[in-house]
DNA sequence: TGGTATTTTGATAATGGTTATCATTACCAA
DNA sequence: TTGGTAATGATAACCATTATCAAAATACCA
């Protein structure tokens, strides 16, 4: 099942309505395949359908997060950015503190270690965020 | 060297002035030994010295972070919280998504893995944030 | 010690991302 | 189609944080 269909099903399953705006915002978001701010997404959507409101973009992004189709990040102290979670599995981020470049990575061994540590402290982990801040190859002296 | 002395030295080293407010805010902060918001710290400080302004608390917290004596966190989407970094070494956090309880942990093996992964991607890591979200022992069904 | 340049402070206005409000519109099951 | 409910758009409100600026405090030097 594609992501768009997945979102439509999510809406139907909870008695939420499938609207033109939600479909458009969700489709536009999924097509970006990068970390996006609500504002950026709003501008893209507005090109196609100028009457869509910023509030609806925020509302739809929240829905996409609840549906497990998006994830919200706040790298450093900047404003929220969202990324589509499509088929990709969970992954973490390397953030260059100089140029802002973001690279994704994924490492099962770390995930396993995390679960072990949490269990030893009596926690049951649902999700996690791992962010490594430093200098990317280009920004190194 | 104690943390207060350390902060005073940090100020002196950069030609910044050591003021009554900075000393009081810094001392109050160090004594808390927990994750604190700017507002909370402001209230505590105000008990002792009612004329200290909130802006100065924010300014001093920023200074403490630059001095390496504090660290800023934004767990989930809540407002910033700060923690004293005193003698404790770097550590990570387990956050209970139900009751908000925060537990610290530290694990050298994870740190080592992180550095290896980053290096393999050409990154030079300066700092990192690892947050595990889930249910603490008390909140588990 | 007193004078002075400079920094810091406190009060408050401004900022900016995000959310709440509410009248209007769109959806969808019957 | 209709009726009931949910969603939308415009915009006001929110609220944590930052900027502004006149007044006060500090550090340095003679």
Image: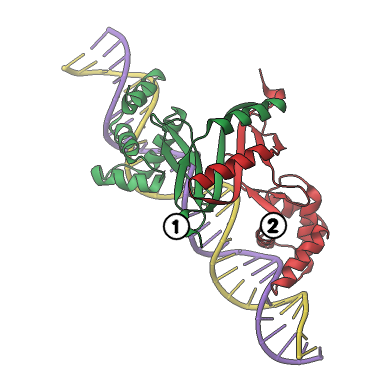
Chain colours: A red, B green, C yellow, D purple
Q: Which residue is label 2 attached to?
A: A68
Residue lying at 76% horizontally and 70% vertically, measured from the top left: A18
Image: B115 above or below A70: above
Image: D14 above or below A107: below
Q: Is residue A1 left or right of residue B75?
A: right
Q: Chain of mark 2?
A: A
Q: Quadrant of residue A58?
A: bottom right
Residue lying at 77% horizontally and 69% vertically, measured from the top left: A19
Q: Chain of mark 1?
A: B
Q: Quadrant of residue A65?
A: bottom right
Given residues A96 and B100, the one toward you in this image is: B100
Image: B83 above or below A138: below
- In percent of width and height, residue B87 lies at 39, 29
Pointer 2 local density, CA inside 10 Å: few below 14, some 14–19, many at least 20: some
Image: C28 above or below B41: below
Q: Is residue C23 left or right of residue B27?
A: right
- In percent of width and height, residue B10 lies at 39, 22
Q: Which element is circle 2 on?
A: loop
Q: Which residue is label 1 attached to?
A: B138
Which of labels 1 and 2 is toward the front?
1
Res. B9 in view:
yes
| Alpha carbon separation for disc pair 1 and 2 | 26 Å
Q: Which element is circle 1 on?
A: helix
């Amino acid at each position: 099942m594609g992501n768009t269909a997945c979102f439509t099903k999510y809406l139907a399953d909870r008695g939420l309505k499938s609207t033109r705006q939600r479909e458009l915002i969700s489709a536009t978001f999924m097509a970006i395949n990068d970390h996006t701010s609500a504002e950026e997404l709003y501008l893209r959507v507005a090109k196609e359908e100028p009457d869509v409101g910023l509030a609806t973009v925020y509302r739809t992004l929240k829905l996409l997060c609840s549906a497990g189709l998006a994830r919200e990040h706040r790298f450093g102290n900047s404003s929220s950015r969202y990324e589509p979670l499509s088929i990709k599995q969970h992954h973490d981020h390397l953030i260059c503190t100089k140029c802002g470049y973001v690279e994704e990575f994924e490492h099962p061994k770390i995930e396993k270690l995390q679960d072990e540590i949490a269990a030893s402290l009596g926690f049951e982990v649902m999700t996690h965020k791992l962010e490594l801040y430093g200098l990317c190859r280009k920004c190194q002296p």
